[in-house]
Image (cartoon, rainbow, N blue to C red):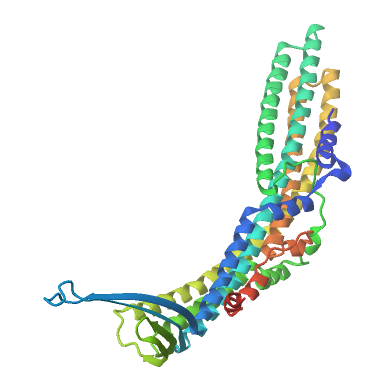
């Protein structure tokens, strides 16, 4: 009886063989399914458009226009012309206009740099979102797996307590037991049934969470993976790797660049701007005929003197945001270092807990078998047997939790390193990225070619 406990635990983990739904398969399905990741990708593409918008500030705007008017007058009535004179003329004009800022104290260049940094930050946000999603998938995966193991363990407990209850009744019938033994067995069976129902509820909740992330219901799960090979050999190496490549840190660096460029753009508003403008067109009137071709070319230089405090406020705000971006970056460094250390310690702790739990399970099995034999010989009571089974159950639950914690801590460390991504894990998916889109939208003349076509 006692030996079947671990048998059920192993069966709950490995059932399904080659058809098992591996962690890699779950991560792959979640990557393709996750709406949050698609949302981050769309946000990055929207951020890329800011580059084209910033570049347009110093590029010409050309527009064509055509307009028409009909003018009429009614002359004053007189004795000779009692109805007055009516005169009507029609005029049509058509032309092109041209406007371009040729100098704005390098404000546009700063805005372009800010837009590029913002697009880069949005790309790193995709990677950050990707890591959060994949880690949540691993947690959901292991919750389903551990809850299935707990259900199997609870079912085994029910079988054991049912057998002990029947044994107590049989012993009572032949005068070798007491009603207390029967009552104790009944109480433990009731507790076991309640624990079984709680385990089923926990399993259903974890399955729903799994399906939310992965898009399909969990089938036969297997916690086997080989991603531990991505973990550095030492804690210091792990911290160094995280500080260089974690997307949250790279994002914070890009945010600093964007804030610095924003500050430069705000300061540039104090300087002069120069622009040129022109137009060319022709007109046609019903009475005068063609008016020929006319044109205009002009320039404008503007120097700000006073703007109601708006310029100074914008500079101060930009400087504050730059300082804030640097503070946020320091916070990101601290959080990543703490996450690496915590995950590293979690793996070490889980290893120790697994070793201790395995020893406890093995010892509890032997104790339970010995107590059952002694009870049969009359030197132990049914309560001793029930308590020994409870000890075995506690040790088994500890082993389940420790094994789950080891897997979650491993993937948590990969996330803290910045390596819980589809590329690093080698998932068979097309990596979601806005880099290609960003390169394409920087072609600011595409709009003109589209019109020409």
Q: Nearer the viewer, residue 77 or 312?
A: 77
| Residue 448 in picture, x, y percent from top left | 57, 78
Q: To which quarter of the image does residue 361 belong?
A: top right
- 114 to 328, vertically: above or below: below
Q: Is residue 35 above or below residue 51?
A: above
**Relative to residue 110, is residue 42 drawn left or right?**
right
Q: Quadrant of residue 376?
A: top right
Query: Where does residue 163 sit, x and y in percent of width and height?
Result: 80, 19
Give percent across and percent down for residue 305.
Answer: 31, 88
Quadrant for the N terminus in the image: top right
Residue 296 is drawn in which quadrant? Answer: bottom left
| Residue 208 seen in the current view | yes
> Residue 175: image x %, image y %?
80, 7
Q: Quick one: which residue is furthest to the left in this view?
A: 79
Q: Between residue 448 and residue 93, name the one nearer to us.
A: 93
Q: Would residue 11 be found to the left or right of residue 55 on screen?
A: right
Residue 256 in view in this figure:
no
Which residue corresponds to the image point at 72% horizontal and 53% vertical from the top-left?
Answer: 349
Q: Residue at x 21, y 76 (%)?
A: 85
């Amino acid at each position: 009886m006692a030996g079947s406990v671990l048998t059920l635990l192993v069966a709950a983990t490995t059932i399904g063989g080659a058809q098992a739904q591996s962690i890699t398969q779950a991560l792959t399905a979640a990557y393709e399914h996750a709406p949050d990741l698609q949302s981050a990708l769309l946000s990055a593409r929207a951020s890329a458009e800011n580059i084209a918008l910033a570049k347009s500030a110093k590029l010409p705007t050309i527009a064509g226009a055509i307009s028409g008017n009909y003018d009429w007058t009614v002359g004053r009535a007189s004795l000779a012309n009692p109805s007055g004179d009516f005169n009507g003329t029609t005029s049509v004009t058509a032309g092109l206009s041209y406007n371009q800022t040729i100098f704005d104290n390098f404000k546009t260049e700063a805005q372009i740099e800010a837009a590029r940094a913002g697009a880069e930050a949005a790309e790193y946000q995709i990677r950050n979102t990707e890591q959060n999603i994949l880690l949540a998938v691993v947690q959901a995966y292991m919750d389903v797996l551990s809850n299935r193991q707990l259900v199997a363990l609870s079912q085994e407990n029910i079988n054991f307590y049912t057998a002990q209850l029947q044994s107590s009744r049989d012993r009572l019938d032949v005068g070798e037991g007491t009603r207390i033994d029967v009552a104790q067995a009944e109480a433990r069976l009731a507790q076991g049934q309640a624990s079984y129902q709680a385990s089923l509820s926990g399993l259903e909740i974890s399955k729903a969470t799994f399906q939310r992330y992965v898009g399909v219901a969990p089938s036969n799960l297997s916690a086997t993976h080989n991603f531990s090979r991505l973990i550095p050999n030492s804690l210091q190496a792990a911290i160094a790797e995280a500080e260089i490549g974690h997307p949250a840190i790279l994002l914070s660096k890009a945010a600093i660049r964007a804030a610095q460029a924003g500050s430069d753009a705000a300061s540039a508003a104090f300087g002069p701007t120069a622009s040129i403008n022109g137009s060319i067109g022709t007109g046609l009137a019903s009475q005068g005929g063609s008016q020929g071709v006319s044109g205009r070319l002009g320039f404008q230089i503007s120097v700000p003197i006073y703007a109601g405090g708006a310029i100074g406020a914008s500079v101060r705000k930009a400087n504050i945001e730059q300082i804030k971006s640097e503070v946020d970056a320091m916070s990101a460094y601290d959080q990543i270092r703490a996450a690496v250390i915590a995950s590293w310690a979690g793996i070490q702790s889980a290893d120790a807990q697994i070793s201790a739990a395995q020893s406890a399970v093995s010892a509890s099995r032997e104790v339970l078998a010995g107590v059952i034999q002694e009870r049969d010989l009359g030197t132990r009571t049914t309560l001793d047997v029930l308590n020994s089974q409870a000890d075995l159950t506690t040790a088994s639950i500890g082993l389940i939790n420790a094994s789950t914690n080891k897997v979650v801590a491993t993937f948590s460390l990969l996330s803290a390193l910045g390596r819980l991504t589809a590329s690093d894990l080698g998932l068979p998916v097309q990596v979601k990225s806005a880099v290609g889109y960003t390169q394409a939208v920087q072609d600011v003349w595409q709009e003109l070619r589209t019109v020409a076509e």
